[in-house]
Amino acid sequence: MAYIEPAPIKDKENPFESMMSRFRIASQHLNLREEIFNVLKSPDKQVIVSLPVTMDDGTIRVFEGYRVIHNNILGPGKGGIRYDMGVNLDEVKALAAWMTWKCAVVDIPFGGAKGGIRCNPREMSSGEIERLTRSYTQAMNEVFGPDTDIPAPDMGSGQREMAWLMDQYSRSRGMTVNAVVTGKPLVLGGSLGRIEATGRGVMVSALSAMEKLKINPYKATVAVQGFGNVGSFAALLMHERGSKILAISDISGAYYNEAGIDINQAIEYRNDNKGILHGFKGAEQIDSDDLLTLPVDVLIPAALEDVITMYNADKIKARLIVEGANGPTSAKADDIITEKGIMVVPDILANAGGVTVSYFEWVQNRLGYKWTRERVNRRMDRVMMSSFNNVYKTSLKYNVSMRIAAYIVAIEKVASAYEYRGGF
Ligand code: GLU
């Protein structure tokens, strides 16, 4: 029998409310007109589709898919597609709004969007995921487009899914349209440097913040939560710059080594073991919750939203938090963290390296041209550093946290585009 699996119940803050509370604070600092506030708080478009898919055993299952375009005043909607059992409309709405702010913070000409399919890709065969991806793309045929809404990978999806998406969309148009999606395999018009871009941006943000806090990267200790695409590259690049990665974690648990973990070895182990660290011997296993409260200089949450909450925020000992994940700190934890004097490089700045290189990929596709890895990295580093400095300056000007400053930078830009365009 076909059925839609219910979302697991989470004892967590509603992510959309979490986003809204920061948005509200930043809007007050900016004296944003209420009309503009009301426009910006409502997503432009929300699409929910049912996706019947034939499973390998011959049964038909119906999955639920979402795409939310939060805003497209600065350009086409942009944002990843999440494949996860926790996907729900409020989460996708929050993630879409975060994409609007993220693109505005790093000043790329995109709006914000996000998609999701409620499924457990770990329990599905490659054929099942392919049929699901094609069915989702077909359902979103009128939503996606290189000038309207450009998807990309997110949790649970990667190059493989983006290739299917591009193929399905291209078939419907009768020609190859590679600019409809980013995060593609290189041979299909992907960009050099895209895979590691988010992790690299996290590293660049961390180093910029460490400079302000006078933390020497060669002496710094780091804990990284999440060892997927973002966390593993962030850990590797920090490790290569001389910092000691004391702890890493993934769904199999957390791993600690006082002498520092050999990140190359951990990545190799993960790649050889179905993508998880289970059984990794280069460190001792510790409780996953304890990773967040270790006495380290830098904490990089690079897994899920809502992991730093009002329940554990006061136990955090790091001096700097660099948010590789989207929304890892709940709104209620913000005050505790700020009170403790911990600097947070917020998600919409720290993890914007991914969408920045997505933008470069889209530019290359439209130019029919390929950039070298050096050019991609150099340009991304430049974008990340100047965005960091802009947010830092704004935080001093308004005497607010880096998070509220990032929202101020973003909202100011989007709001001023509305003021100029008008037409309501
Ligand atoms: N999913 C990534 C993010 O949350 C990348 C989005 C993109 O490249 O469009 O930033």
Image: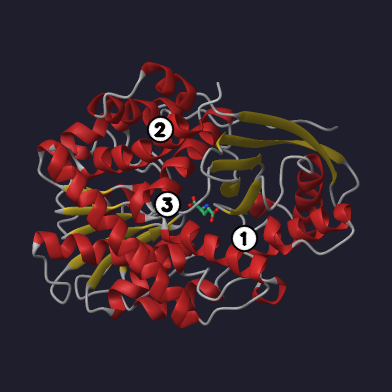
In the rendered view, tell whether residue 406 sits above or below residue 210.
above
Q: Where is residue 344 shown, x and y percent of the image? A: 23, 48
Ligand 1 closer than 8 Å to label 1 CB: yes
Mark 2 or 1: the one toward you: 2
Circles 3 and 2, Cβ within 8 Å, touching? The answer is no
Mark 3 or 2: the one toward you: 2
**Mark sitting earlier along the chain (3/2):** 3
For image coordinates 65% across by 75% down, the residue present is 186
Q: Distance between the residues labelled 2 and 1?
A: 27 Å
Q: Where is residue 214 shown, x and y percent of the image? A: 8, 64
Q: Where is residue 235 shown, x and y percent of the image? A: 34, 69
Q: Where is residue 368 shown, x and y percent of the image? A: 68, 73
**Mark sitting earlier along the chain (1/3):** 1
Tell me which corner region of the image, top left, top right, bottom left or bottom right, holds residue 417. Answer: top left
For image coordinates 22% across by 79% down, the residue present is 242
Mark 2 residue type: Ala
Question: Mark 2 — residue?
Answer: 415
Query: What number is the disc on residue 258?
Result: none
Mark 3 residue type: Ala
Question: Of residues 401 and 277, which is closer to you in this image?
Answer: 401
Q: Can residue 234 be seen in this view?
A: no
Question: Mark 3 — residue?
Answer: 303
Question: Mark 1 — residue?
Answer: 182
Mark 1 lies on a secondary structure that is loop
Q: Is residue 196 left or right of residue 404?
A: right
For image coordinates 59% across by 29% down, the residue present is 44
Q: Badge 3 local density, few (<14 within 10 Å), some, or many (20+)?
A: many
Mark 1 or 3: the one toward you: 1
Q: Badge 2 local density, few (<14 within 10 Å), some, or many (20+)?
A: some
Mark 2 lies on a secondary structure that is helix
